[in-house]
Amino acid sequence: MRVKIVMELEDVPGQLLRALEPISRFGGNIQSIMHQRERKTPLGRLPVMLIFEIGDRARLNRILAALRSRGIRVTQLGEREGAVRTTVLLVGHIIHTDIRDTIDRLNAVKDVMVSDLSLAMGAPGKESSARMTITAADEKRANLAISKLQRIADRKKLLMITSLGGV
Amino acid sequence: MRVVLVGFGNLGRGLSRAFIQKASFLHRSYGLIPRVVAAVDEFGAVVDEKGLDLARLLEAAEKKGTVAAAKGGKRGKLAIKVIEDVEADVVYELTPTNIKTGEPGLTHIKRAMRAGKHVITSNKGPLVVAFRELDSLAKRCGVEFRYSASVGGAVPVIELARKLLAGNEIREIRGVLNGTTNYILTRMTTEGAPFEIVLREAQELGIAEKDPTLDLEGIDTACKLVILADSLLGMNAKLGDVRRTGITRIGPEAIRLAQEAGQTIKLVGIARRGSLEVGPKLVPLGHPLAVGGTLNAVTFELDLAREISIAGFGAGPKETSSSLLGDLIDIHRTLGG
Ligand SMILES: NC(=O)c1ccc[n+]([C@@H]2O[C@H](COP(=O)([O-])OP(=O)(O)OC[C@H]3O[C@@H](n4cnc5c(N)ncnc54)[C@H](OP(=O)(O)O)[C@@H]3O)[C@@H](O)[C@H]2O)c1
């Protein structure tokens, strides 16, 4: 089943890894991680939304127990079906080639949304990298979005790195 | 079995050491007694139909840089002469890879087959250039042809698929097939260091060549993919059929972004009937292809078994001798030994 949780992490290095470890240990397959920086709590904690695939309820309970024992607060928990997510990386002159335009074009595809974006600037004069999570209503839409992004990447001379095994 | 070694570099020597080390084991377990009756390198050859003393041969070659320096050796004696004239059962073709012409390996292999000798090779060149031709020539000449070491080094990729998965239809083959690029990607992951620095380190350690183009541009991976496609998927692919992207644009930033999403970046070759592709891919951490260092890994997608993965050392004289020796034992068994 696919599970969505929102948890609150202290905004210091290493916290995310601490939270992810039990999920992979109990066989969870993490599909998406979204920092909700704009929703920082008054105590300075950072809500992080996670979506992962897990075999059964028993494993999910073990994950939740492990998170609790690590002092990580889970504020939302829900099972969800339907939406397909895929992660891609882009390498190149991402800002100069107008990342906003790239995203707008993807969002223009019906039932497709860029749900997460992280940028990492390269050293001066070097290429930058971006990670994008694309959420689509189903696999067909997701594949459509990927091929559209590939065409945009080709035109903008960006290297696009997709997930093994596609969507 | 009388054996000729054509090429006495890393692999020729590694195999000779394995023959020495495993002599009584091979005899006991398989009734196999490999007798090296000739060794050839670029400078010359040494022949002894009663069987060469391998320890002496290794010593001479290591000291003087050529097998011709061994007792009874002749400078200037050509591989082709030895292949055709010396009485032998199996020719090991272990010369350097040339992916454009396949030579000198291609000629060596053809001549050996026409002379009725079984062939074992680690050399990708002849396979990439002329797989179909060599495969049917072997059949026409009634000889065995093995090339386990050409893909995956010590990892028995081809034989696993051929023998143990023989009841399956292979839908897709995905592989991390190049140790050099995998090392670079791994070091960028663990050190967060820039590409150029990690590459230089790899060169200093002898993991990357002085001219690392074939590795970095994914050409070596593409060659191995062609061999897998031709030998396991029944294709007749050429290097030009592979869509290919290398890893030179990938930096530590991209890898960090991948890691934050629970993924890592690997240079992956993907073969499906009618589609061959090499490029960097996001691979989930903990996935069978997410192997570190110079390791190689392959996943088969199959109709019955669904997915089977295998990983191990993709190069090294000792490691690769496992495949070279395995091929000989396999031929020995096939012939009823
Ligand atoms: N090393 C590995 O771990 C590994 C793993 C898998 C596959 N392979 C492949 O296996 C093959 C051998 O690898 P290697 O590492 O042993 O290479 P190597 O150390 O360069 O040895 C090549 C040998 O071939 C000889 N040679 C070159 N031209 C020749 C000719 N025209 N006639 C006869 N001998 C000739 C060389 O002689 P001189 O020394 O006199 O020039 C040398 O003895 C290559 O195709 C390589 O790609 C290697």
Image (tube, coloured by chain):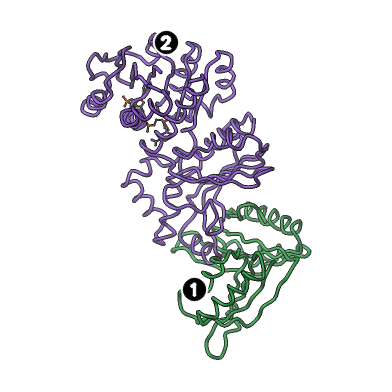
Chain colours: A green, B purple
- Chain for mark 1? A
Circle 1 crowding by C-alpha within 10 Å: few under 14, some 14–19, many from 20? some
- What residue lies at 45% left-to-right and 27% top-to-bottom? B329
- What residue lies at 51% left-to-right and 66% top-to-bottom? A120
Q: Nearer the viewer, residue A80 or A130?
A: A80
Q: Which residue is mark 2?
A: B84
B170 in relation to A43, above or below: above
Q: Nearer the viewer, residue B222 or B32?
A: B32
Q: Quadrant location of residue B212?
A: top left
Residue B246: numbered disc: none
Circle 2 crowding by C-alpha within 10 Å: few under 14, some 14–19, many from 20? some
Do tags 2 and 1 sit on the same chain?
no
B252 in relation to B224, above or below: below
Q: Which quarter of the rendering shows the C terminus of chain A?
A: bottom right
- What residue lies at 41% left-to-right and 23% top-to-bottom? B31
The x and y percentages for residue B214 are 46, 39
Q: Which residue is mark 1?
A: A18
Q: Quadrant location of residue A8?
A: bottom right
State the residue lying farthest toward the front.
B28
The x and y percentages for residue B185 are 45, 53
- What residue lies at 49% left-to-right and 29% top-to-bottom? B147
Figure label count: 2
Q: Nearer the viewer, residue A44 or A14?
A: A14
Horizontal placement of B72 versus B290: left or right? left
B79 in relation to A166, above or below: above
For the residue marked with disc 2, what is the amino acid?
Glu
For the residue marked with disc 1, what is the amino acid?
Arg
Horizontal placement of A136 versus B82: left or right? right
Question: Do the residues under discs 2 and 1 have CB atoms within 8 angstroms?
Answer: no
The x and y percentages for residue B35 are 35, 19
